[in-house]
Image (cartoon, rainbow, N blue to C red):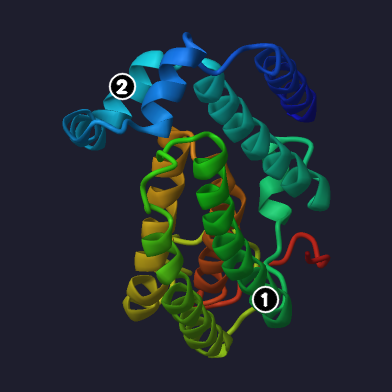
Amino acid sequence: MKSILSLIICLCLGVLAFTFQMEPYKDLEAFNKIYLGSDNPSEQEALQKNYHQLRESLLTPKYKLQDYALSILILSVMLFIFLKIYSIKSSADFRNIIIPSPTKIVLLGFMAAIGLVLSFLFGLILTVLRKEVPIWADSIGIPLMALPPMCLFFILVLILYSVMGWIEYKKTPLFPVFLKSTRPHWVWIIIFGLPLVLSMAFLILSLIMGAFYFLAPTILWVLFFTFWLSAKKRVSVPLYNQSAL
């Protein structure tokens, strides 16, 4: 499994190296005209309505190749690290994965929250660098205003779910979660399952859109909710491997 991931990582790095030799626009002079705007009021009004369509028509595959290559690269690296940490060499080794201690799960959530905020900022910077918004438009100010409430939201989510996660915590193997004899109470499934599903949906959406900068922190959120949910098993199950993350 690790050898396959290593091959995928090498292929992604090769694609990225290839894209650095590509030009982002088919006609740079034509793009600069729409990017810088026009002194003619009617032309400027048309640019305001059609800037994104005009830009898309002038783009080469460079940015899309970079986005999807980086997305696959990040997923592969994260999976490689996960397999390395738990010494997984075959599918049978997955039963040896033991959920971390509560303190480490909280730390994982903290890293996920900080990472998602930083990813949001990186996405805005990338938008400017790739000239996805014209120089004459104020399209970055509004998203920046959302940063403080976003930070507050993630702090509240982290505190709330960390406190609830500590309740009835059991150090058990990560898999299986939903066996009839061991599955968590339905209340815990709803409390931790809903944000887990939302995190997984956001992960898939980010992958489809090529938003590579959201992948790593979203994976951490998925692990955060998965670990807490698994810790709510009704009865302890045999520990195959006492070592934890």
Q: Quadrant of residue 239?
A: bottom right
Depth check, front residue: 164 or 94:
164
Tag on residue 102? none
Element at label 1: loop
Q: In the image, 200: left or right of 89?
A: left
Query: What residue do we see at 49% from left, 42% from top?
Result: 127
What percent of the width, then of the height, locates residue 109? 61, 71
Give the residue at mark 1.
Answer: 171
Ranked by sequence position, the earlier of labels 1 and 2 is 2
Dot 1, crowdedness within 10 Å: few (<14), some or many (≥20)?
many
What percent of the width, then of the height, locates residue 184? 43, 74
Q: In the image, 46: left or right of 198?
A: left
Task: Judge whether 180 appears above or below 91 on screen.
Answer: below
Dot 2, crowdedness within 10 Å: few (<14), some or many (≥20)?
some
Task: Judge whether 95 appears above or below 13 on screen.
Answer: below
What percent of the width, then of the height, locates residue 44? 24, 34
Query: What residue do we see at 37% from left, 52% from top?
Result: 139
Query: What residue do we see at 62% from left, 80% from top?
Result: 170
Quadrant assignment for the N terminus? top right
Q: Amino acid at mark 1?
A: Lys
Q: Quadrant of residue 84?
A: top right
What percent of the width, then of the height, locates residue 25? 50, 15
Q: In the image, 125: left or right of 191?
A: right
Give the residue at mark 2.
Answer: 54
Q: Amino acid at mark 2?
A: Leu
Can residue 60 be seen here? The reply is no
Query: What residue do we see at 56% from left, 84% from top?
Result: 162
